[in-house]
Amino acid sequence: MRIVVFGAGALGSLYGGLLSEDHDVTLVGRQEHVDAVNGSGLHISGLREGVYRPKARTSAEGLGIQDLVLVTVKAYDTRTAVREVEAMVGEGTAVVSLQNGLGNSEILGRSFGPRVIMGVPFMGVTFSRPGHVCLAGLGETVMGSPSGQHGLAIRVSETLSAVGLSTRVSANIFPEIWMKAIVNASINPITALVRRENGCICQQRELRELSKAVCQECTKAAEANGIALGRGDPFDKVVEVARMTARNRSSMLQDVERGKRTEIDAINGALAEAGESRGLSMPVNRALWSLVRSL
Ligand code: KPL
């Protein structure tokens, strides 16, 4: 298959690297990363140790129609990504979002309709330096089609499973997208503010209580928006992910440390808006949103 990873940071490079074992993969990313990957390969350390050989470039121009386009840009770049991705999408292309936050499905859906598959990854991946990523937590990737193209979601999921990425297909992907956003809202800003690995959420009582308060607010926002998160306490999922990725630095902490813009608007900001639009007050999410934005 011809596969492009559009926005190859930590997560995109991991997927692209593993897929390059079986497929013709091109990573589209930043200059220094592209130079390092083309020069001495993509080095994955941690749980899937190895040197992988995807191609890499800084623009998608001229790549032509692909079988699979993995969209891994930050949520605030999804709108801009659409313009470059468009030239790679034909009749048989699947456009797969592997992003954080709320709103990506709607933006991609407006341009690519039934071709869009949403992927919800629970991974702890760190961008160590150009050409190097470290996999510290390997969870499942839940896949689903927002427009009911279940067969396409199954085909994409089989492609990922074949290279050792554990996947599950969901017939109703929206609760999964919300659940992941809630997990990110309850882990990422706290770890970014205290500058610690995800495990701190389970290890320190004060941080665990703060995380639980965020999660409870978000759960109410989901209910008020008609999103059925399923049985069980969503905070159990937060704790499970924090444990599984305990040694990982959240993507938001990595962004803050590298002086990059964070995804706080698409995570706590979007959840706060979703709750407030239904008349709920979301003070804990708003406080974290203000603090991270002030960084
Ligand atoms: O998605 C993540 C992120 O950091 O953005 C988790 C799963 C919390 C892993 O760090």
Image (spheres, helix red, strand yellow):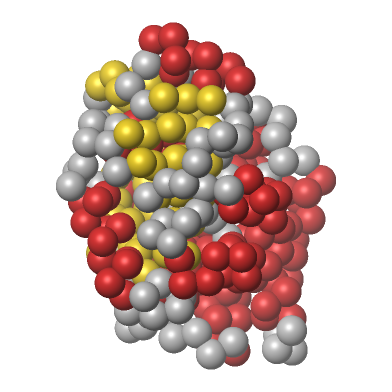
Quadrant in which the N terminus appears: top left
Examine the image and state in which quarter residue 60 appears. top right
Left or right side of 55 for 194: right
Examine the image and state in which quarter residue 199 appears. top left
- What residue do we see at 74% from left, 84% from top? 277
Q: Is residue 66 above or below residue 214?
A: above
Q: Nearer the viewer, residue 224 or 48?
A: 48
Q: Is residue 106 above or below residue 99?
A: below
Q: Nearer the viewer, residue 162 or 23?
A: 23
- What residue do we see at 81% from left, 46% from top? 294
- What residue do we see at 77% from left, 41% from top? 295
Residue 56, visible in the rendered structure: yes
Return the x and y of residue 104 as percentages of the image width and height.
59, 62
Left or right side of 285 for 139: left
Q: Nearer the viewer, residue 154 or 66?
A: 66
User: For the view shown, which residue lies furthest in the top direction?
Assistant: 39
